[in-house]
């Protein structure tokens, strides 16, 4: 999974919190967040990194490498729960 973009919250980037929510968007981009609600209102403190760095740092994400586009994985009771993620493509 080299050179695949992933938008991450500052907590995940700094390594102060693990990824608890992972989204694979319809356009191929990914998003990984800590799942907490203490981010800036516009999420302007998020950064883009290569997703392979996340898989290297947090081994329990390895099972999500094949997460299908338009799906979300949420960590609940130490297990990943995957479900469809409904989003509309921009016009």
Image (tube, rainbow, N blue to C red):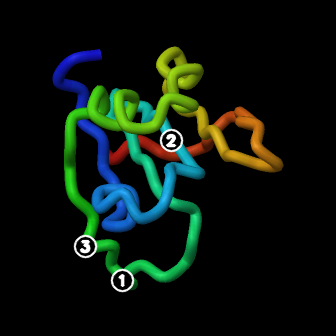
Q: Write the residue at 55% across / 25% down.
A: 64
Asked if residue 76 lies left or right of residue 24, the reply is right
Give the secondary structure at mark 2: strand
Q: Is residue 68 visible?
A: no
Q: CA distance from mark 2 to mark 3?
A: 18 Å
Q: Residue 81 sits in which quadrant?
A: top right
Q: Write the residue at 46% across / 37% down.
A: 58
Q: Is residue 37 visible?
A: yes
Q: Position of residue 73 (x, y in %)?
A: 63, 38
Q: Residue 45 sits in which quadrant?
A: bottom left
- In the image, 15 versus 76, the foreground residue is 15
Give the secondary structure at mark 3: loop
- The residue identified by callout 3 is 45
Q: Position of residue 21 (x, y in %)?
A: 57, 49
- In the image, 72 versus 85, the foreground residue is 72
| Proximity of marks 2 and 3: CB atoms separated by less than 8 Å | no
| Numbered badge on residue 4 | none
| Proximity of marks 3 and 1: CB atoms separated by less than 8 Å | yes
Badge 3 density bin: few <14, some 14–19, many ≥20, Cα 10 Å: few
Q: Write the residue at 39% across / 29% down.
A: 55
Badge 2 density bin: few <14, some 14–19, many ≥20, Cα 10 Å: many
Q: Identify the mark nearer the N-term, 2 or 3.
A: 2
| Numbered badge on residue 23 | 2
Whether 11 is drawn above or below 48: the answer is below
Q: Identify the mark nearer the N-term, 1 or 2.
A: 2
Asked if residue 41 lies left or right of residue 47, the reply is right
- The residue identified by callout 1 is 40
Location of the N terminus by quadrant is top left
- In the image, 77 versus 2, the foreground residue is 77
Q: Write the residue at 61% across / 43% down.
A: 86
Q: CA distance from mark 3 to mark 1?
A: 7 Å
């Amino acid at each position: 999974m080299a050179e695949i973009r992933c938008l991450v919250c500052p907590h995940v980037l700094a390594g102060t919190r693990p990824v608890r929510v992972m989204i694979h968007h319809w356009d191929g981009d990914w998003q990984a967040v800590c799942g907490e609600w203490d981010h800036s209102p516009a999420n302007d403190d998020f950064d883009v990194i290569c997703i392979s760095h996340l898989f290297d740092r947090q081994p329990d994400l390895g099972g999500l490498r094949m997460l299908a586009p338009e799906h979300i994985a949420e960590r609940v009771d130490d297990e990943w729960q995957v479900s469809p993620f409904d989003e509309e493509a921009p016009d």
